[in-house]
Amino acid sequence: MRADTDGDGKVSLAEWTAFQTERKAKGDPARSFARMDANTDGFVDKAELDAFLAKRFARLDKNGDGMLGVDERPGHKTAPNQEQ
């Protein structure tokens, strides 16, 4: 929620784009924002972010042990081949 620069408890697309630009993140910020905005209201709140990250973690945690091993981390040669 560091991207929530106006402190209203939710992140707008403009805030997300600025945050991603500052971080020099790869990829289209609008596309990643759309994946997180589960209710399509134009904002991402903490609940949506938590749900998104939980799903992402579950996909990466191939052995289901609740931890990411070296071989499960994004970018590792055996990690799932998907946009991070």
Image: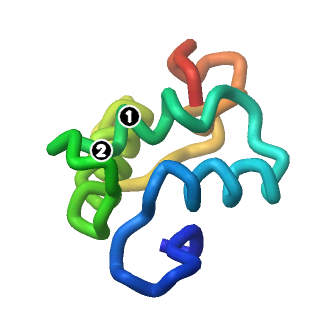
Residue 58 in percent (x, y) is at: 31, 40
Residue drawn where x is 53% and y is 33% of the image? 30
| Left or right: 54 as drawn, with respect to 1 | left
Residue 59's label in the rendered image is none
Quarter of the view holding residue 38? top left
Q: Which amino acid type corresponds to the residue marked 2 in the rendered image? A: Asp
| Left or right: 11 as drawn, with respect to 74 | left
Front one among 1 and 55? 1
Secondary structure of the residue carrying numbered label 1: helix
Q: Are marks 1 and 2 in contact (CB under 8 Å)?
A: yes
Residue 43 in percent (x, y) is at: 33, 55
Secondary structure of the residue carrying numbered label 2: loop
Q: Is residue 45 above or below residue 17?
A: below
Residue 37's label in the rendered image is 2
Q: Which amino acid type corresponds to the residue marked 1 in the rendered image? A: Ala
Dot 2 surroundings within 10 Å: few (below 14), some, or many (20 or more)?
some
Marks 1/2: CA distance? Answer: 5 Å
Residue drawn where x is 64% and y is 48% of the image? 17
Front one among 25 and 6? 6
Quarter of the view holding residue 2? bottom right
Label 1: which residue? 34
Q: Is residue 4 above or below residue 15?
A: below
Residue drawn where x is 64% and y is 41% of the image? 70
Dot 1 surroundings within 10 Å: few (below 14), some, or many (20 or more)?
some
Quarter of the picture containing the C terminus is: top right
Q: Is residue 13 above or below residue 22?
A: above
Q: Is residue 82 above or below residue 7?
A: above
